[in-house]
Amino acid sequence: VFGCSAAGELTGWEFDSGKKLGPFLVDPKGITALASQAGGPGEHAVVVGGEGGTVALFGPDIPGMIRPLFTCDSAVVALAISPDGSRVAAAGRDRSIKVWSLDDGQELQGIRERPAPILAMAFRSSAVELVIGDAVGKLSICLTGTRDNTRWHAVHEREGAVLALALAADDRTAVVAGANGYLKVWDLEKWKELATLPGHRDDVRGIAVQSRTGRIATASADRTIRIWKMP
């Protein structure tokens, strides 16, 4: 399990032994985004981003525990790791997205001038399609592997910002959450709302979907963590 501080430090703890790893300084201006991968080559590592634009890889299997990856042009507001552990996408406060290879650290693509700030992202299994939620409530898919990197499709708009999203193991079901406690389940192939999950009384800022059972965990500014069955 990993935790971060306002001072820009990241700390990890091993589940089995309780051993503390760190703290490690990531960005002296503060940590603003964190992403982990469930399963695959990077299952024991997380990617963290900071107010100063720093993006780093952290984990017990990495020499020195932490490895700087790259620097964005502005503060990092959202991160996503592809399911195969090959790519990381970083969204900046300047409304840009950068996609990098985790294998060799090379920048694969840069996408600029999005119409609204991006607040949440998740890769589909192809490691090409990037599901994105933004500050005006739009949910869309970016085809990061195309030459025309402005190709976006199937946009849906909700009231309020999309603050968090996660994909289920079937790669087509998205759990989307945001301002004022809204929590929705969407079919990304049909762009159909499958369910609304009421209960939170304030902004929902974190989502995780358990790959084996499909259970959903959400964390809200109302100071509650809730566990849900996938509809």
Image (spheres, grey):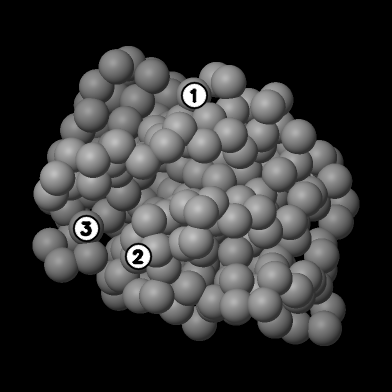
Q: List x then y, in percent, for residue 13.
A: 28, 40
Which residue is found at the position 60% from the left and 78% from the top?
103
The residue sitting at 18% across, 39% down in the picture is 18
Mark 2 is surrounded, within 10 Å at the Cα level, by few (under 14), some (14 to 19) or many (20 or more) other residues, namely: some
Task: Report the residue at 82% width, 65% height from top.
Answer: 110
Q: Which mark is residue 43?
A: 2
Q: Is residue 135 left or right of residue 112?
A: left
Q: What amino acid type is highlighted by mark number 2? A: Glu
Mark positioned earlier in the residue sequence (3 or 2): 2
State how many labels appear: 3
Q: Residue at x 39, y 75 (%)?
A: 41
Above or below for 223 versus 149:
above
Between 220 and 64, which is closer to the camera in this rendering?
A: 64
Give the residue pinned by disc 3: 210
Q: Are marks 2 and 1 in contact (CB under 8 Å)?
A: no
- Tell me the quarter of the picture where residue 132 sits: bottom right
Q: Reading the chain from its start, which is encountered first: label 2 or label 1?
A: 1
Give the amino acid at mark 1.
Ser
- Work out whether 63 lies above or below 25: below
> Given this view, does label 1 or label 3 mark the residue nearer the observer?
1
Residue 117 location in percent, x, y? 72, 40
Q: Is residue 16 above or below residue 39?
A: above
State the separation of the CA atoms marked 3 and 2. 14 Å
Query: Which one is earlier in the sequence, the residue at label 1 or at label 3?
Result: 1
Q: For this rendering, which residue is in front, 159 or 110?
A: 110
Q: In the shown orientation, is residue 31 left or right of residue 36?
A: right
Q: Position of residue 17 (x, y in %)?
A: 14, 45
CA separation in Å, label 2 and label 1: 22 Å
Would you name the residue on which mark 1 appears?
5
Task: State the SS at label 3.
Answer: loop
The part of the image, by quadrant, that contains residue 8 is: top right
Badge 1 marks a residue whose secondary structure is loop
